[in-house]
Amino acid sequence: MNRSGTAGAEAYRGLRELKHGLPSYYYYDPLHHERELHALWYTNWLYVCRADALNGPRCFRTFTIGDQEVLLLRDETNELRAFHNTCRHRGSRLCNEVMGILRGNSIQCPYHRWVYDLSGQLLGFPSIARVEDFDKRDYGLYKVGVAEWGGFVFVNLGGADAPPLDAALRARAGRLDNWPLAELVVGYSHHMTLACNWKAFWENFSECYHCPGIHPELSRLVPIYGRSIMSRYEDPDWFRYRDDEDPRFRGGLRQGAATWSMDGQAHGAIFPGLTAEERKAGQTYVTAWPTMFVVGHVDYVRIVSLRPVAAELTELSAEWLFPRETLERTGFDMANIVDFGRLVLEQDGAACELNQKGLHAMAHKQGILLPQEFAVFAFQEWVRAGLAQLTAHGDRAHP
């Protein structure tokens, strides 16, 4: 469930009539899924891990995105580098391990023993004959774009052609400037495999139309969600309640609550740099389609990221970040926080799977969107734009 402010109000007012959703086959057709991988996943910045998951020179990790494999490492100077996990010789996979530490300052292909330095430059290869007109500088590893924001590491398969990361962090990355993102550490991780298309999750995230029926506990914690809206400006009559401090109308947490937890109370130290408005809101979001969203709560930060496995299968990972001193504190009740977040995610996952199961009906060609689903429409327009871009440049999914 994405949170929107006055920008959301403008979008809402601009969506007065019913809108057609994406075609149903977009959610289950394997060929279309492959097109979306090329149009949306292979061209955008993708969250892969926290920076401290690679905690020193020569540490590496590998990641799979669709049918592409990425090798992420720190070179001998501790700089992040990313490459396709592929040798330039005949395309062998370079690293079979998910993570580890390289034995030296080089990468050797296990197939024919071509050797590269940690910047990706080809160092040499065994050969019984001299190769004429061969310049090793022309045969380095295929580079992948890599960038870091607030301790979050992103990769982009576009390499040198990748746009700036800032453009991918929707709803202004600066919204989380008052949270010490880079200093936080992962205290708990949760992984789910959802039997649904990845877009079904983002569409569910983008509206609160479902909240009263799917999230009773969350709707009690954030009362405006119980009205099927995400912010005060989505109410056509919001101006009537502009001075009403009841959270059912202004948004934010219920009276007496401080954060997302089973009892609504903060169980870690409240971040000292937050404004009064940020504390009152209870949650501040930054999204990066198609890969992840980050939520700043008053005492912790939560990350939810997606990975498409197949047309009707999506991997979801959630990470809870805390100050190190909070995790080391005797009696810290992490379960009170994590259990609430897991409850909401599992409810969302079940709703997405329910949605997915009905999409194969022969009679159902596409859905419709009501005005309060304006953020779903915005997401679907983003999908359409990416697919149009792919078509304009030739359908690389089927060369």
Image (spheres, grey):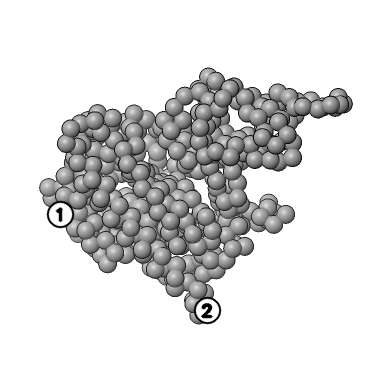
Residue to which mark 2 is pinned: 362
Is the residue under label 2 in contact with that under label 1 (CB below 8 Å)?
Answer: no
Where residue 69 sits in the image (x, y, percent)?
Answer: 59, 43
- Residue 196 visible from this viewpoint: yes
* 103 shown above or below 66: above
At 52% from the left edge and 39% from the top edge, which residue is drawn? Answer: 98
Residue to which mark 1 is pinned: 246
- Along the polypeptide, which appears first: circle 1 or circle 2? 1
At 50% from the left edge and 23% from the top edge, which residue is drawn? Answer: 57
At 55% from the left edge and 38% from the top edge, which residue is drawn? Answer: 97
Mark 1 residue element: loop
Where residue 146 sits in the image (x, y, percent)?
Answer: 54, 34
Q: Amino acid at mark 1?
A: Asp
For residue 193, side relative to residue 68 (left or right)? left
- Residue 145 visible from this viewpoint: no
Where residue 32 sits in the image (x, y, percent)?
Answer: 59, 62
For residue 334, side relative to residue 169 (left or right)? left
Q: Amino acid at mark 2?
A: Met
Q: Which disc is residue 117 wearing?
A: none
Q: CA distance from mark 1 to mark 2?
A: 45 Å
* 382 shown above or below 116: below
At 60% from the left edge and 46% from the top edge, which residue is drawn? Answer: 68
Q: Nearer the viewer, residue 313 or 169?
A: 313
Question: Alpha-carbon neighbours of circle 1 within 10 Å: few (<14), some, or many (≥20)?
Answer: some
Quarter of the image for the C terminus: give it: bottom right
